[in-house]
Image (cartoon, helix red, strand yellow):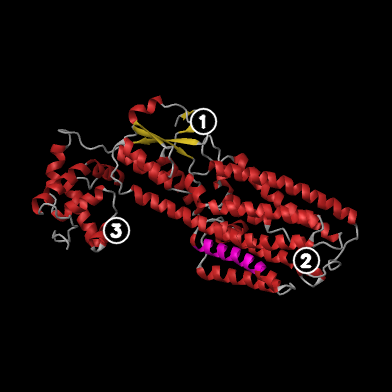
Amino acid sequence: MRRRGPGIIIPPRRVRSVRRAAIEAREAPSPAGVQGAVTRVRDAVLVRPWSPRAAVAATVATCALGLAVVAQGPVPERGLLVFLAGASWAAMGAYHRTRHEGPLGAMAMATAILWFAGRLDEAGDPLLFTVGNILALTFIAPALLTLITVPTGRLSLSPGALDPTTGRTDPRHVRNGRLLIISAAGWSLLLHAWVLFDPDPNPSCPGECAGRNLLLADRPDIASGIQAAQAAGALVLGVLVTGWFRRARRNSDPRHRHAFAPLSVVIVMLIILSVAYILASNAGRPAIANAVFLMFLLAVILVPVAQLSGIQRLAELERSAMAFLEPNPARSPEEIEAALRTALREPRLRLTPAEGVGDLAPVPAGTLRSLLQDEGGRPVGAVDHALPTPGSQLLARAMDWAQQRLGSAPPEPGEDVATWEPRIRSLTDTELATAARLCDQRTNGEIAEEFVLAIGSVNNRVSRIYAKLEVRELGRRERAAAMLRIAPLVRAELDRREGSRAPAGSPRRGPDDNGTPRS
């Protein structure tokens, strides 16, 4: 397709073909040998949904680890918050992995395990105490990965990895995201080794913890140098993470921002509390550091809750958008534009009819242009819209809907009326009522539910309708376009029959299978 300025024209059919190719590649047989075994394990853990039994087993094992860790702590109330924080991550990970593909749930489970391992920093045993202090911040890397890749769990499908001028994944942003996660992992593990050189490594530890850790050497100068490097690294990572989140929010469509607004608030809380904890610890204020840590625990509990609710809310917004579009009677470009703005929550979305496609100006950065075509490949319009949510099919489905509506104009007087009217009049009352639903793009299952019929009866009736209308041999898309095109004629015939049969002012009713109006 031709590029027009910084925006790109995307045919919806090409988007779906790319998705199909990705699915076929994922479902291809794994190679044999060690590489095949590794691939199968990776797919079982990170890609394919878990069975409920496997999810429950993973959650129980992780929570058992958490209970063992909490038992090492001296303060039950603090231990309860520690356990709830890790358990919330484990529960979110297990729930997500049973219902969705992708590694997001597995990363949440890894966050829970590393969280519990790091909470050994209050254990009474010197070895466990030392190991816990070294691992205290290792949960940050997988937790950060879930935050910057929600809802798909993949950097390549993260809003922060999109190029705002094309709407496609920018390999440079993906590489930067990987480096960010690797840097966070190294920062949290390697630069926390200063606990091996400081006899008092955990000022916020309840009780007397000084001297409990195993020392390689009592070298406050080395500990201070590593602490300074850790503080500088935290500052650099904070700037990079903030930049990623800003870019992700700028590239996200309105539905994504609305669904994950609570998560954004919790992330800001985490950042503020983390900075406050570091400042209080370095200033030698254990009481303040302990109070901030308790608030930090509450925020950690809220993160997976906000993530999961955002994922569910985004899915609900997409379902409601299509439920609004599919029965919508819009036919003119103005009506279709208004319907798309409402369904996609984009008040600045703009639809250009076919006659204006050739004179379109370049679209600004952060906006994409989708070219709508009829079955013959002729343009029927163009839509300027926000960047699509990665991994979502809503935009492609909405563009398909607009494409069908624009490509199926009502028959012109004297053009198709003489051909279609005899076919439509040959339909029985029940077939006509069903044809009206087909014109509204209703599925056979929805029609069966509305008329309280078996799905087999509806399938047979629809087959008879297509035979009488002489569209049974057409492809699915061509048949749908034809039904949209004759919708005004079908409704006119339906109104004519109901008007001649029912008294004035009586309500319309859906017919039963014999054509009798329902009571």
Query: Which of the numbered marks, if any, corresponds to residue 442?
Result: none
Badge 3 local density, few (<14 within 10 Å), some, or many (20+)?
some
Tell me the quarter of the image containing the N terminus: top left
Q: Which residue is mark 1?
A: 6
Q: Which of the two labelled residues, at mark 2 and mark 3, occupies the earlier sequence position?
A: 2
Q: Which residue is mark 2?
A: 205
Amino acid carrying label 3: it is Gly
Residue 99 located left or right of residue 488: right
How far apart are the alpha carbons under marks 1 and 3?
A: 43 Å
**Spatial CA span between label 2 and label 3:** 61 Å
Vertical side of 371 occupied by 97: above or below? below
Q: Could you tell which of marks 1 and 3 lies nearer the N-terminus?
A: 1
Q: Which range of residues does the magenta coloring cover?
A: 81-98
Name the residue: 13% across, 51% down.
Answer: 498
Element under disc 2: loop
Going 29% across and 54% down the picture, which residue do you hit? 443
Residue, disc 3 = 445
Where is residue 387? Give x, y as percent.
49, 40
Q: Separation of disc 2 and disc 1 at Cα?
A: 54 Å
Confirm or deny contact between disc 1 and disc 3 (CB under 8 A): no
Q: Which residue is more in the foreground, 50 or 266?
A: 266
x, y percent for residue 469: 18, 46
